[in-house]
Image (cartoon, helix red, strand yellow):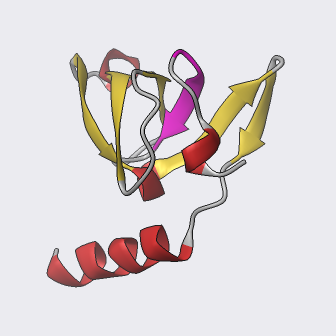
Amino acid sequence: MLTNEIKKGMKILSVQLGVPVSGVMMDNKKGNTRLVNVKGSEVGMFDEMGSVYSHDIVEVKVDDAWIPVTHTEAQLKLKQRVKELF
């Protein structure tokens, strides 16, 4: 599934905190960032809602099964640029 196909309310797994954590998609946008309510308390951090790079979303829950996310070429290029900067 592409990140652009993930709809508001769907559960996701993301790695922007350094380890996989679950979250809930809070928008229906498309592009390089998405609004996610992230459950940081799963790894000893705070739960919060904010922008997450689309390339950090790795799985989405569909019909009680976790499906891998496929990223667009633009999202993969951004991931490389971010990696080079930090």
Residue positioned 81% across, 17% down in the render:
64
Marks counted in the figure total 0
- Image position of 41 with respect to 14: above or below: above
Position of residue 20 measured from the top left corner of the image (x, y, whole percent):
49, 39
Q: From the viewer's perspective, is 29 left or right of 65?
A: left
Residue positioned 65% across, 52% down in the render:
2
- Image position of 51 with respect to 48: above or below: below
Q: Residue placed farthest to the left in the image?
A: 85
Q: From the viewer's perspective, is 77 left or right of 12?
A: left
Position of residue 31 measured from the top left corner of the image (x, y, whole percent):
41, 54
Residue positioned 40% across, 21% down in the render:
26
Q: Which residues make up the magenta segment?
A: 9-14
Residue positioned 28% across, 81% down in the render:
81
Taking the magenta stretch, the answer to whether it contains residue 65 is no
Q: From this viewpoint, is residue 32 visible?
A: yes
Q: From this viewpoint, is residue 17 visible?
A: no
Q: Quadrant of residue 45?
A: top left
Majority secondary structure of magenta residues: strand
- Image position of 57 with respect to 64: above or below: below
**Residue closest to the eye, 78 or 43:** 78
**Residue closest to the eye, 14 or 25:** 25
Taking the magenta stretch, the answer to whether it contains residue 12 is yes
Q: From the viewer's perspective, is 39 left or right of 67?
A: left
- Image position of 64 with respect to 77: above or below: above
Specify the quadrant that holds the C terminus.
bottom left
Position of residue 47 measured from the top left corner of the image (x, y, whole percent):
26, 16
